[in-house]
Image: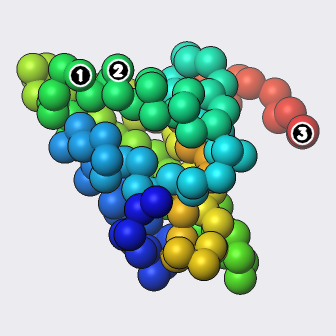
Amino acid sequence: MSTKIFPTAQDAQNAFYEALERCDLEAMMAVWSEDEEIVCVHPSGQRLAGQAEVREVWQQMFAAGPHLRVQITQQLVIAGVMLEVHSVHENITVASEQRPRPPMVATNVYLRTTAGWRMIVHHASPAPAAPTAEAAAASPKILH
């Protein structure tokens, strides 16, 4: 059981991205709820459910060591008393590359527990390419 307490969901999110940049598995897993009902989906990856699957994939990702910088932009927060949903753009720069990668769109869901706020869902996927002015004007409006 993690002794780390995150007083706010934003504190948990900050710790999540710090652990990601440092490739710190223990810090990463301290952010996650200790319940088995957790879900993680990495870009173009399969759905991981439960502590064992989530931990194993983070461990594999961190094996290469720290090499990412992540800047969060366009954050939208939907806040409740016990649950917060953060929709963000993850702007990732890899140390060995000259320019940033295209952004990822991520949804992070946090649950307020007796041990503070904990992540229960992380789902990231590539952001769609921004349409050109011509394409935006020519494309029909679609309601969903």
Amino acid under disc 3:
Leu
Amino acid under disc 2:
Gln
Q: CA distance from mark 3 to mark 2?
A: 40 Å
> Do the CB atoms of the residues marked 1 and 2 lie less than 8 Å apart?
yes
Pick the residue in front: 73 or 60: 60
Of the numbered discs 3 and 1, the one sitting upstream in the chain is 1
> Do the CB atoms of the residues marked 3 and 1 lie less than 8 Å apart?
no
- Residue that protrudes farthest toward the right in the picture: 144
| Circle on res. 60 | 2
Where is residue 83, by image quadrant? bottom right
Q: CA distance from mark 3 to mark 1?
A: 43 Å
Quick check: 28 left or right of 37? Answer: left
Q: Is residue 90 above or below residue 45?
A: below
Where is residue 138, by image quadrant? top right
**Residue 128 drawn at (x, y percent):** 56, 27
**Helix or strand or loop: what does disc 2 sit on?**
helix
- Residue found 53% across the figure and 75% down from its top: 115
Where is residue 87, by image quadrant? bottom right
- Residue found 31% across the figure and 41% down from its top: 25
Tell me the mark number nearer the camera, choosing from 3 and 1: 1
Q: Which residue is mark 1?
A: 63
Quick check: 73 left or right of 130? Answer: left
**Residue 46 drawn at (x, y percent):** 62, 18
Residue 130 seen in the figure = no
Of the numbered discs 3 and 2, the one sitting upstream in the chain is 2
Q: CA distance from mark 1 to mark 2?
A: 5 Å
> Do the CB atoms of the residues marked 3 and 2 lie less than 8 Å apart?
no
**Residue 11 drawn at (x, y percent):** 40, 71
Q: Which residue is mark 3?
A: 143
Dot 3 surroundings within 10 Å: few (below 14), some, or many (20 or more)? Answer: few
Dot 1 surroundings within 10 Å: few (below 14), some, or many (20 or more)? Answer: few
